[in-house]
Amino acid sequence: MDSNSVKQSVVESYGKLAKSTKNGLFSKLFACCDPTENAKAVGEQIGYSTQELNAVPENANLGVGCGNPSALADIKIGQTVVDLGSGAGFDAFIVAPLVGKSGKIIGIDLSEDMLDLARKNAKQGDYNNIDFIKGDIEQLPLSANIADHIISNCVINLSNNKRDVYKEAYRVLKKGGRISISDVILEKELPYFVKTALPVHIACVAGAEKLDDYLQYVQDAGFKDIRIARTTAFPLELIIADPQIQKIAKAMNFNLNSDEAKDLAARVKSISLTATK
């Protein structure tokens, strides 16, 4: 798949999710994620506390994560945190009280609709220490050496240029700064017909890579003290059953039978990792 076409499709799909949320529909677009009325329950399952989930604006938690990256970061008052693929602002709002009024959070996203929703949520929650900026995580619109922490939740797997993402994260971090990332990896290689399928890429699977390859990108960027803090199963069967994913798949004449779906589910895991510049 062409990198630009994949990126555009991902942005459009996230835009639809943001629009449906702004319209009060809360439809489900991604199964790496489950943006439904059960989003809080999903959030608890992937590592968020009830207090954290109840503290954010109503439309911030879209259920589109695969972990709680802020739980891995030793974030302190007055620090600067960058959120790669900030979406509706959920993780940024979780981090906001940790950095306090003297700190700053910068959310980066390519979707104008998601940025609009995040800014609306920030206004609703009276968050004055967060800026949401349009940008590509492969080429961040930020100066070097400005961040104490970089977090990201189930987003980097969507990039076909993960090496560039981690190089950019390294550039933007201060010396001694840390990344705290939740993402999706493969335990076994995907079949070619799945890896090249856009519907499965949008569902946070086809862009995933084997753990050793993924960690090599982090190491090549210059990071040290790379640590896998958590590895959990990834509910791929929910992704395949997702009505929006099925709609895209049907338009592309793409189908998986139940045995193929089970086989894919066994190949995918969610990880949470940390590393230091």
Image (spheres, rainbow, N blue to C red):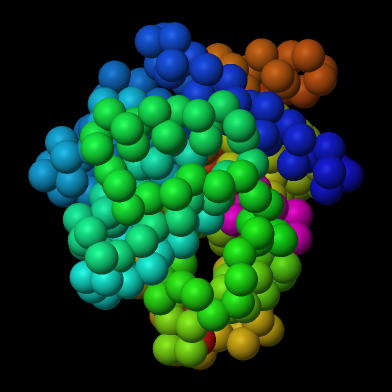
Q: Position of residue 262 (x, y in %)?
A: 55, 37
Q: Is residue 125 left or right of residue 257?
A: left
Query: Dividing the picture into quarters, in which one does residue 53 lie?
Result: top left
> Which is more toward the observer, 174 or 20?
174
Give the residues in magenta.
Answer: 156-161
Query: Dividing the picture into quarters, in which one does residue 164 lie?
Result: bottom right
- Does residue 239 show up magenta in the picture? no
Q: Is residue 277 left or right of residue 93?
A: right
Q: Position of residue 250 (x, y in %)?
A: 74, 14
Question: Can residue 87 be seen at all in this image of the molecule?
Answer: yes
> Which is more toward the observer, 260 or 92?
92
Q: Is residue 112 left or right of residue 89?
A: right
Q: Residue at x 32, y 72 (%)?
A: 79
- Does residue 160 show up magenta in the picture? yes
Q: Residue at x 28, y 43 (%)?
A: 127
Q: Position of residue 216 (x, y in %)?
A: 65, 79
Determine whether 250 is above or below 254 in the image.
above
Query: Dividing the picture into quarters, in which one does residue 188 lie?
Result: bottom right
> Which is more toward the observer, 41 or 176?
176
> Which is more toward the observer, 175 or 229?
175
Q: Position of residue 68 (x, y in %)?
A: 32, 55
Question: Can residue 215 be seen at all in this image of the molecule?
Answer: no
Q: Residue furthest right?
A: 2
Determine whether 169 is above or below 175 in the image.
above
Determine whether 194 is above or below 13 in the image.
below
Q: Residue at x 63, y 18 (%)?
A: 246
Q: Residue at x 52, y 17 (%)?
A: 19
Label tally: 0
Of the 4 image quadrants, the one containing the N terminus is top right
